Amino acid sequence: MSLRHYGRVLVIAPHPDDEILGCGGTMARMVDEGLDVHVAIVTSGRPPSYSIESVARVRDEARRAHQFLGISATHMLDFPAAALDGIPTCELNEGLAKLVRDIKPDTLFLPFIGDIHRDHQLTFVAALVAARPRDASAPSRILAYETLSETNWFAAPTTPMFAPDVFIDISIERKLAAFGMFESQVKAFPDERSLITIEALARLRGSTVFLHAAEAFMNVRTIER
């Protein structure tokens, strides 16, 4: 079926490449169907933890991958990477609230609250604050995506478990090509950030619902208007 009902889409990623790992195939399909798809990268590396050269490189990789997929716009919020827990909550909330107000997405894709990386957890919560349904412009759909090496490494079931209930048919070739453009992030198998593992997860999610490849999501909220 068509994905046109998702309307204007905003994918919020804590770090560059999370959006491809979680939604790369879905974004490609949505763009092909004429949807307006935006990506927001919440954080950026800063010295001394990240060199200026490495930060510039991964930003360039993200731009290339987004251009390849046909993303409408990439929004860099520039909060400090791996340090969101040092930012006042009100600043992060307002940064994402302004983004949501400006873009007015019909659908939000967010990292999963149960991811092991604290940046992912804080991004999820701040995005939900930004998307509170206080008027008719609030997003109608919010879905959480899974990120290899983050979603599967918390202490489920003690912590929240990713239990997908939405599966979107994708082209695995487009997803792999987009992630391959993050040359600084691609690892050799059996690392989870390898192209082999990314394909394996997509094949597994697909075969769960009798598809060749899929991306899986948890429905956080749906408003039928």
Image (tube, rainbow, N blue to C red):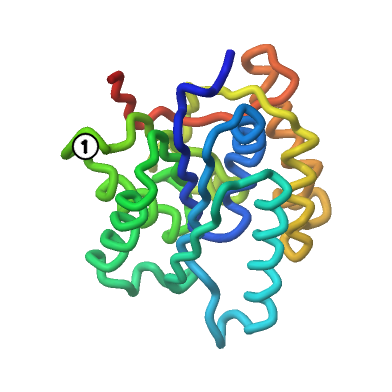
**Can residue 43 be seen from the camera position used here?**
yes
Q: Which residue is mark 1?
A: 133
Q: Secondary structure at mark 1?
A: loop
Pinpoint residue 106: horizontal percent, then vertical percent. Answer: 38, 34
Quadrant the C terminus occupies: top left
Q: Amino acid at mark 1?
A: Pro
In this rendering, would 16 be left or right of 166?
right
In this rendering, would 211 be left or right of 95?
right
Quadrant the N terminus occupies: top right
When the figure is inspected, residue 140 is found, relative to residue 152, above or below; the finding is: above
**Can residue 155 be seen from the camera position used here?**
no
Pointer 1 local density, CA inside 10 Å: few below 14, some 14–19, many at least 20: few
Task: Farthest residue to the left: give it.
Answer: 134
When the figure is inspected, residue 47 is found, relative to residue 189, above or below; the finding is: below
Task: Farthest residue to the front: give it.
Answer: 34
In this rendering, would 48 be left or right of 181?
left
Pinpoint residue 116: horizontal percent, then vertical percent. Answer: 48, 53
Pinpoint residue 135: horizontal percent, then vertical percent. Answer: 18, 37
For the point 80% across and 35% down, the residue is 173
Pinpoint residue 45: horizontal percent, then vertical percent. Answer: 55, 75
For the point 79% across and 52% down, the residue is 180
Front-lying residue, 1 or 201: 1
In this rendering, would 173 be left or right of 4?
right
When the figure is inspected, residue 185 is found, relative to residue 148, above or below; the finding is: below
Residue 185, quarter of picture: bottom right
For the point 27% across and 49% down, the residue is 130
